[in-house]
Amino acid sequence: MDLSSQTELLLIGVLAVVWMAFFTRTVVFFRREKAGVHPLYPDSWNVGQRIILEKFRLLVGLGLLSLWAVFFAIRPASSNSSFGYLEILSLIAMLSISYAWVLLLAPRDLKWLETFPQSFALVIAFLVVWWGTAFTAMGWMFAEAAAASTPIRLLPNGVFA
């Protein structure tokens, strides 16, 4: 087995792990929502701050929808060239930030944040920087993929036996 095949198998393994983590966390989120379990916010957060966090979660979700649309738009339906790493790395990155979004939706007990003074401002600042960085990195990756001569593909071409 050559290095290229080992790398492909490793990337496919990482993809499988990230996909299962995303799927599992999504199932947990929907089970909690169906059971009516609502998040516990710190007592120091007022209703307006809670609404801001909820709207931020929605904004991130809408941003992710647009990133997924761009991802599927820049990847062709079929290609005859050999396996490209950019495509699977892009898919792993998209699944990873989608997993992070589900984690942002799913926390049920945020009361531990009360140990930090001004916890709302810290949480929002951290989330804005983190998501801004994630979206910028994905945008850059997609811009590079769109400019590249080799299109992005979802799975390797060829026969594996």
Image (cartoon, rainbow, N blue to C red):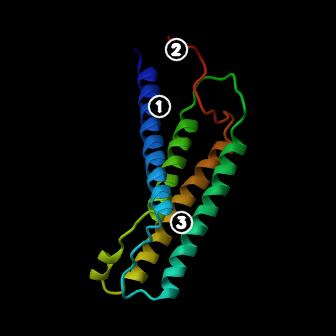
The residue that disc 2 covers is 160
Name the side, left or right, on which 110 lies relative to 23: left
- Residue 2, picture quadrant: top left
Image quadrant containing the N terminus? top left
Disc marking residue 12 = 1
State the separation of the CA atoms marked 1 and 3. 27 Å
Of badges 1 and 3, nearer the viewer stands 1
Residue at (47%, 31%) from the top-left corner?
A: 12
Residue 51 vs residue 140, the one in the foreground: 51
Residue 147 vs residue 158, the one in the foreground: 158
Q: Residue lying farthest top? A: 161
Residue 111: x and y, percent?
33, 77
Name the side, left or right, on which 154 lies relative to 28: right
25 to 45, vertically: above or below: above
Q: Secondary structure at mark 2?
A: loop
Disc marking residue 132 = 3
